[in-house]
Image (cartoon, grey):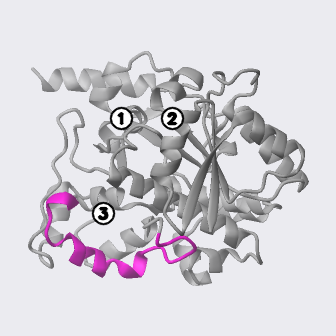
Amino acid sequence: MIEWLLVDDKPDEAEQFARALSVKGMFVVTSIRAKDAEDRLGKGELRPSGVLMDVDLSSETGMRSTGPGMAQNIRVAQQRQSAPSFPIVRFSARARVLENIGHDSSSDDVFDLKIEKDGLSEIARQKVVQRQLFGVTEVYHAAGGEFDLLTFVGLDDKHWSLWGHLAFEREMANADRPHLKAGRIIRLLVHPGVLIDEDLLAIRLGIDRHQSKSWSQLLDELAPIRYSGVARDHFPRWWARGLEDWWLDLSPPQPLAGSSIEERHALLTRYHSDLRRLEMPEESPGDRPWRTCLLTLEEREEIIPVDPSKGVRITPRETLPPWMDPFVAVLGRALQSRDDPRLDRADLDRLSRWAKRGSR
């Protein structure tokens, strides 16, 4: 039985979430007061399969620690090996995250995943979160045994040299504890870069997958570049460079990233006729989509494609590793958030002038 704890300062609300996320006979989530979790940690008795952690614990009488602060204490104990390795997932309402953390990424490393409570009354949303929790549990379990990177990610040496990244390999070589190894693998799975999810896969192919009857057939054809490592059933992913190699095998006039939506769609429909072409939203100009908008993902978990040449770069507060894709925002949303200090001012000014010329 997989047993997770939910650390929250609102017991009634926490109980509801715990019941919603539990799977009878397989996966149980139990709510716990923050002070009780803190006491267990101090006694070396905090040994769950994983922890869901709210960011704001101030409603609990006598509790001074924040969720990120307690998560950091757990990580210190894991590094000292006075606590076993288990995943920690930030679990909070979007409004409380913005209020307590904002866009500060300094606490990101202590959390393996960041899940919002918003929308968890919907069964479909619950199933997505359950699958993610199963997945990170599986990664931690595997990282606790004998570790080999290529076996873990399901590639041979040849394909890792083509599709992987040396910088990530170096990161893994420096991970001297199971929770550090697991955390890096989860980051590889979650953040676009070396691997991409199904939404980004469709965007890079220029296809509206939700309106395409042939999408499943196209996915079957892409099976050789699908991630086959640990937690593959819980995190469906594809190798980004593998996708580009697959595209070149079709003998296109130019590489995938340099092709327009129309060109991508025209080539793919030679083999799969019932594919609907992706339509770019009005707020996202350009016709060579390759990334997604960070701002809309943060604010409402909406996925909007971005053509990098018409997007606004976002500078994170901490340097991203080279194997991760850079952050961008669609122009329309960036213009509404001009005061966000992370937005690249040169991009914003250049594209604002471009948009004004185009509207004349």
Q: Is residue 217 magenta?
A: yes
Q: Residue furthest top?
A: 339
Left or right: 353, with 320 as reference point = left
Please name whichever residue, 48 or 217, is drawn nearer the observer in this view of the structure.
48
Please name whichever residue, 82 or 58, is drawn nearer the observer in this view of the structure.
58
Residue 230 in picture, x, y percent from top left: 58, 73
> Which residue type does callout 1 highlight?
Arg
> Which residue type does callout 3 highlight?
Leu
Residue 196 in picture, x, y percent from top left: 43, 60
Span colored in magenta: 207-233
Residue 199 in picture, x, y percent from top left: 33, 56
Identity of the residue drawn at 62% across and 65% down: 2
Label 2 CA crowd tier, 10 Å (few <14, some 14–19, many 20+): few
**How far, Cα to Cα, is label 1 from label 3?**
29 Å
Q: Is residue 254 magenta?
A: no
Q: Which mark is residue 300?
A: 1
Residue linked to disc 3: 256
Examine the rendering and report whether any part of residue 322 can be seen.
Answer: no
> Which residue type does callout 2 highlight?
Glu
Quadrant for residue 76, please give it: top right
Q: For the residue labelled by badge 3, is the local secondary structure a helix, a strand or a loop? A: loop
For the residues bearing labels 2 and 3, Cβ distance under 8 angstroms: no
Left or right: 139, with 22 as reference point = right
Q: For the residue labelled by badge 2, is the local secondary structure a helix, a strand or a loop? A: helix
Task: Please name which of the two marks, 1 or 3, marks the residue nearer to the observer.
Answer: 1
Task: Please name which of the two marks, 2 or 3, marks the residue nearer to the observer.
Answer: 2
Instruction: Mark 2 or mark 3: name the one nearer the start of the chain.
Output: 2
Q: Which mark is residue 13?
A: 2
